[in-house]
Image: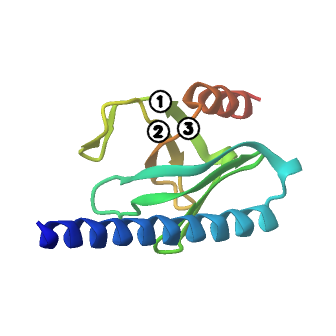
Amino acid sequence: MPVAVCFMVGALFIVAGLVHFLKRLQTGAMKEVLREYPPHAHVIISPMANMFGLKPPGVKQIRGNGVLVLTSSLLYFRMLIPAKKLLIPVSSITGVETPKSFAGKTKGVKLLKVDFRKADGKTESAAWLVDRLEEWVAELHKLIDS
């Protein structure tokens, strides 16, 4: 019995440490995003978006949690671990969808999927699990259609 209690207490400390670590990373990422894109420049922001990756297959995958922000000219994702950035000019976005899976991954809910054209003319897609999905879709359509 005492071994089980020690194990559970140890596991709780580990989980608490990880939560604290992730909150610090998220706070740092938000500060960075707010420095680069102050609140008056945001159309919409998700402080904890979950990126499902990039398509087509063969593209170096970026998967993980981070800050997703939409400005009038840019869709910007700042991943927490590793500290990577994905910048998609709004002018290069060719489509917005809400599938339930992307790149072979699913969480059983709709995702925000964005198709875009890279500088070399090739098409890629990225998808995120975001809060306020309908608002994201509406705001992206407003910018794309204008």
**Mark 2 is on which residue type?**
Lys
Residue under pointer 2 = 113
Residue at the far right in the pictured view? 40
* Identity of the residue drawn at 20% across and 71% down: 7
Q: Residues within 10 Å of mark 3 (few under 14, many from 20)?
A: some
- Residue 135 lies, in percent from the top left, at 64, 28
**Mark 1 is on which residue type?**
Glu
Local secondary structure at mark 1? strand
The residue closer to the viewer here, 119 or 11, is 11
| Left or right: 17 as drawn, with respect to 71 | left
Residue under pointer 1 = 97
Local secondary structure at mark 3? strand
- Residue 128 lies, in percent from the top left, at 47, 45
Q: Earlier in the sequence, mark 2 or mark 1?
A: 1
Q: Residues within 10 Å of mark 1 (few under 14, many from 20)?
A: few
The residue closer to the viewer here, 34 or 22, is 22
- The reply to whether the C-beta atoms of the residues labelled 2 and 1 are less than 8 Å apart is yes
Label placed on residue 94: 3
